[in-house]
Image: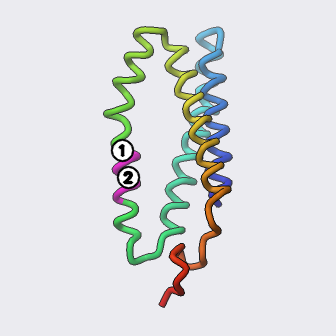
Amino acid sequence: RPGFVLAAAAVYALVEIGLALMPTWWSYALALVPVGIAALTVITAANTYVQTSVVPEVRGRVLSLYLMLFMGGGPIGAPTVGWIAETFGARWSLGGGGLLALLFTGAAALILRNSPAPIPGGSTSGKASP
């Protein structure tokens, strides 16, 4: 399941980079459709993964942290992207965002590849769940 989230994130990043390279307004408008589909896929897959991979006892706490990071990214990221777009142009803000998404997806893939396999029940402590 984390592989699907990572694959969806990589597709989103690549499609966003492609969006930055669109030569005309119409091609840009048409390219927004796959970007939207990829974004919804990433959001849905990540949300589903978080909800189904956490033990029920702490699911509410984990979801609150997840949503805090997810929703709280806008107030931090939006001014940064706006500054990049104003300083370097809109293509750079889109392409840079896609490149960062691709780099972070690759980093997450490396971290997950080198982490121990999860124990059934959502616990990684090595102790059997009651």
Q: Residue 72 or 111: which is nearer the viewer?
A: 111
Which residue occupies 52% across, 84% down? Answer: 127
Residue type beneath disc 1: Met
* Quarter containing the N terminus: bottom right
Q: Is residue 112 above or below residue 29?
A: below
Residue marked by disc 1: 71
Q: Is residue 17 above or below residue 25?
A: below
Prevalent SS, magenta region: helix
Q: How many marks?
A: 2
Q: Report the magenta residues as a range.
A: 64-70
The percent coordinates of residue 90 (x first, y second) are 49, 13
Which residue occupies 36% across, 35% down? Answer: 74
Q: Give the side of residue 21 with respect to residue 97, left or right.
A: right
Q: Give the side of residue 56 with respect to residue 118, left or right.
A: left
Element at label 1: helix
The percent coordinates of residue 117 (x first, y second) are 64, 68
Mark 1, other Cα within 10 Å: few <14 / some 14–19 / many ≥20: few
The magenta stretch spans residue 68: yes
Q: Is residue 103 above or below residue 84?
A: below
Element at label 2: helix
The percent coordinates of residue 91 (x first, y second) are 55, 14
Residue marked by disc 2: 67
Q: Which mark is residue 14?
A: none
Q: Residue 107 or 6: which is nearer the viewer?
A: 107
